[in-house]
Image (spheres, rainbow, N blue to C red):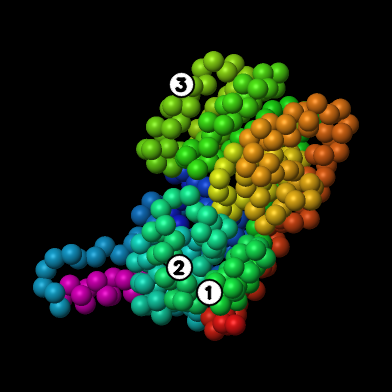
Amino acid sequence: MITLFFDNPRIGHVLDPDSFAELRFGGIQVQMAHLIQGLLQTREYKIVIISDEPFIYPGVEIRSKAKLIQRGVPILSRWINKNRRKRVFAADTPRRVFLQSHIKDGHMTDEAIFAGVETVFRVNSDSLVDDSHPTSSAYLDLLHSYFSKFDIIICQSAYQQRLLRERWRIEAPIVTMGTKPIQLAVEKSELLWVGRCTPFKQPWLFLELARSFPEHACRMVLSIARSVDADLADALAINAKDIPNLTIERNVSYADMPERYARACAFVSTSLVEGAPNVFAEAGMAATPVFSLAVNPANMLDEGELGACADGNFGYLHNLLRDYLDETPEVRAERQSRAHEFAQSQWSVGRMVESYRRVFEHKANARKSV
């Protein structure tokens, strides 16, 4: 039996959406929710989510982060804080594993190590290992300083695996994504954009595409995680008032997303960065080809089965969409069928769960340096 800890409170927004007034989650939360559900079915894992946002899901224990004393008698405060940190990671199972995909300030990693828990870090994006992250380099510097502290690092692709080997002399196993099947729709007509409402996703570019294709219904599903995201969403709504064929939705429940993927004839990504490319996989499962401006995770768009990448050229993205939409219904249906078959062959939840189990069920010293 293994106790598996997650420091990812927004998993609850996928597992128990009724507990939250606002739904805030991304691709990594969806992936972790699928993993938790699959591991619980094996009856060989205890699942603990460290979160100050309470929610309920059968078989999952929710623990609050340690509330540390900042003042008081130094010796007594240190003793109390030490024991509070240990209690967060307490378990009666033979092994304890802490799975992370983001280290924040590093404190939780330090506390897990201090408590004797094995730490597994999941590389969630190419940008974490090839220095293409669009935000501050401070986070990358912090993350990379922890690479030597993690017991195991896992990755999503051969590209990430190669960089970890060459730059940090780390052998990282590849763990695949997992996506549930989606009921296919008979009518597919919309152009669909889904993602976090943040500048590196460049949602405003989809407004330009909606104006360029007035004969097609277009739909944006925005994930609003922070107040700054809401500010951008408000600005988008103002700019979209003159686009009658565009519908903008906010924080749609994960349970309601399959129908939106299914009725779309094309999925559009304008992002500069994609972590767990959940939206690509879900589009494929719904037989919806993917048209990406710049992101091509694990080169999944190279062969044209799932869709196509415009290599950062917005004009080329527009032309790719125009060519596809101008095809006959039979040709579009064939493209949609290929995307569906590709997704089914790559991203079953069962396959993902088994790849994680192969990592968790080896001792921490299985990670070797070259």
Question: Which residue is depicted at the point 55% across and 61% down?
Answer: 130
- Span highlighted in magenta in the image: 76-88
Q: Amino acid at mark 1?
A: Trp
User: Residue 252, relative to residue 6: is it above or below?
Assistant: above
Q: Amino acid at mark 2?
A: His
User: Residue 235, relative to residue 300: is it above or below?
Assistant: above
Q: Amino acid at mark 3?
A: Ile
Q: Name the residue beneath numbered marker 2.
A: 144
The front one of 190 and 50 is: 190
Q: Name the residue beneath numbered marker 3.
A: 238
Marks 2 and 3: which is nearer the front? Answer: 2
Return the disc, 2 or 3, that comes first in the chain's sequence.
Answer: 2
Mark 1 vs 2: CB contact within 8 A: yes
The front one of 337 and 292 is: 292
Question: Which residue is depicted at the point 31% across and 71% down?
Answer: 85
Return the disc, 1 or 2, that comes first in the chain's sequence.
Answer: 2
The front one of 285 and 17 is: 285
Q: Position of residue 356 (x, y in %)?
A: 62, 68
Query: For residue 294, which quarter of the picture?
Result: top right
Q: Position of residue 151 (x, y in %)?
A: 50, 77
Q: Which mark is residue 168?
A: 1
126 with respect to 54 (left or right) = right
